[in-house]
Amino acid sequence: MLFTMEQVPHILVVDDDREIRDLLARFLEEKHQMRVTAVRDAREARRALTNGHYHLVVLDLMLPGESGLDFGRWLRTQSDVPIVMLTAMGEETDRIIGLELGADDYVPKPFNPRELLARIRAVLRRAGDAGERRSDVSVRNLRFAGWTLVPSRRRLLNPQGAEVALTGGEYDLLVALVERANRVLTRDMLLDLLRGRQAGPFDRAIDVAISRLRRKLDDEGRNAQLIKTVRGGGYVLAATVERA
Amino acid sequence: MTLRLWPRSLAARTALVLLVGLVIVQVVGLTIHALDRIDVQRLAEARDVAVRVVSTYRMVMMTAPERRSEVLAQRHRLPGLTAEIGAEPPIVDAPEGPPFGMRILRVSLNLVPLMGVPHWRELRVVTPHDPRLVVVSMLMPDGDWLNMTIPVEPLSALHSPTFLAAFVLMTVAAAALTLWAVRRLTAPVRTLAAAAEALGRDVNAPPLPEDGPSEVATAAAAFNTMAARIRRFVEDRTELLTAIGHDLRTPITRLKLRAEFVEDEEQKGKILADLEELEAMVSATLAFGRDARTTEPVASLDLAELLRTVLDEAGDARPDAAARLSYEGPQHLTVRARPLALKRAVANLVANAVVYGGRAAVRLIPPADGMVTIEVEDDGPGIPAAELERVFEPFHRGEPSRNRETGGVGLGLPIARNILRAHGGDVVLANRPPSSAGTRSGGLRATATLPV
């Protein structure tokens, strides 16, 4: 794990519904050993940010008063703190604007708490990675072996420019592999990305997701060239990644 | 029989009435023309006969009596008739001809100038049975009869083939003009029918042009007003649903969070499953409302991969059904479409097959005639033929008994159809015939088409 006992991640939750704030705080604190400060709007969030240090902000885009998007934009000018947005279900415009202004991920509301937790963990891990320029990660396209990842739309384009559908878990998995290209990712790290998304046993889910990714990247067969299996339990993406 | 002669379409009925009228008018006109023409011919003929008769009479009168028979024998000197001198008028066993014709001939004979020759003492005009001959006898002042037989042209109503051709041409032209005008004038009715049909399929169909004849323009305007009201009604209902859907998000989120604190794992699982279902319904409702104003841009996408991803996700959501999901078709197939919308449409078809039919066999058929075809088959009981179209109506939920168990708000198929039609494709359902082995029922097949 990235966070030791002394380094319990501190999460700022911004949501106007008191029940959701309280329940989410309890869920993250009691069940998943995180520290949570919950506030109801942008004004309170600003005050909280000046008074404390946070590892991540969970931001509801539908806030009374100043909108979540405006607050997120302001926050991005102030710090690099990771942001996970809560968006209206299916409102793609909000989502795209949010990701473009520098939010790290989004979860549509009504969200599944365990999925939100998985996203929080994935974003925290990415942010905790040494030497990673986060703002680059979330906005700029990633190119590898002819393929393009478009983070602002969570899309994968094939070398011909056609979109290749990915499930949420597959997308997160691929981003993790691409961002750490040529470095081995352990199964445990990848498993965390999928937690909360899949039904069924997790260890099997990772193999399934990797084999699907290979199929989608035309990387099938006995000796997969792009996503290589590392003896001892891990995977590595063998490609040069360009950011553009 | 009479019913069969009376056509069904407005255009055909109007055309029939006008054409029958045209034929009657032409026949009456032709008759009047023919009668008139016969009169004129009779007059001209009488005058012609009179001139020939009188000129023969004058020639005979100016010839010495002993030479008269000799002259009359020289037929070339006579103006197209035969004549002889006799003591008696010829006995023809025929009544005096048609009074009118005879009278005209008598009047005409008296009108031709004699130019100094003494007038005849008596005149007889007889028409024998042969209508092409007229016999005129004149009693000359010396007491002999000059008997002349004159061939006449039979009266004919139609004087030339050109006239007949012109007449036929005129009739045909008038008929063609009638048919053209009828088609043109009834076109707005067809347009109106097509518009009503289009409105039935798509509430946002473009309005009718409000031009043309005033009655047509009025009807079009009334139709457009009606369409606008229906659209408004649908929009209001959709907005209401969307509002409810939005409002439900907060309580559902709370419940999902609360469920995480339920100690009983079994109950927790059930609560979460219920909430998933509730969320799916809200999601469908919101998706349906959103489809009305689709703004997603069109992009190139790999349809084969999209279908397999939908199947993967369906399998992840229902691991028990994963083994009964299959894909058949090319590894890659690029089309241009709205990625999220198309994925939702296909996901709805697959979900229907899994829920009601226990299996989803997806087949992608490469383009033919510019359309790719996606078939989704299941092994369910199928649905009654009468329901095949009705299930595409929003909020229609088929048999109540079936839906109590499986949930759903009856929006999956309408959304799928809306999306595919917005792409220029469509989706239809059909019951498959039972397989030849006869071991299993046919099941249902959804066939979606999409332009390449």
Image (tube, coloured by chain):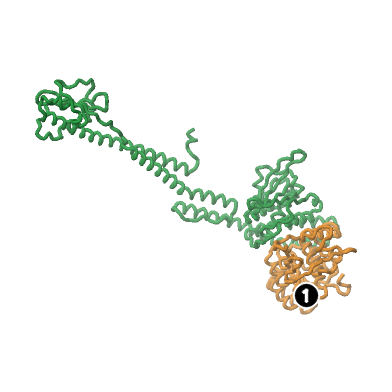
Chain colours: A orange, B green
Displayed quadrant of residue A87: bottom right
Q: Is residue B265 above or below residue A152?
A: above
Displayed quadrant of residue A80: bottom right
Residue marked by disc 1? A133
Tell me what residue is drawn at x 63 percent, y 56 percent: B423
Q: List x then y, in percent, for residue B413.
A: 68, 51
Residue B110 seen anywhere in this rendered image of the structure: yes
Tell me if B155 is positioned left or right of B2 in this view: left
Q: List x then y, in percent, for residue B319.
A: 81, 53
- Residue at far bottom of view: A50
Q: List x then y, in percent, for residue B434.
A: 73, 40
Q: Nearer the viewer, residue B318 or A110?
A: B318
Q: List x then y, in percent, for residue A109.
A: 73, 63
Residue B280 seen anywhere in this rendered image of the structure: no
Query: Disc 1 sits on a residue from what chain?
Result: A
Q: Secondary structure at mark 1?
A: loop
Q: Amino acid at mark 1?
A: Arg
Tell me if B262 is positioned left or right of B12 in this view: right
Name the quarter where the C terminus of chain B is drawn: bottom right
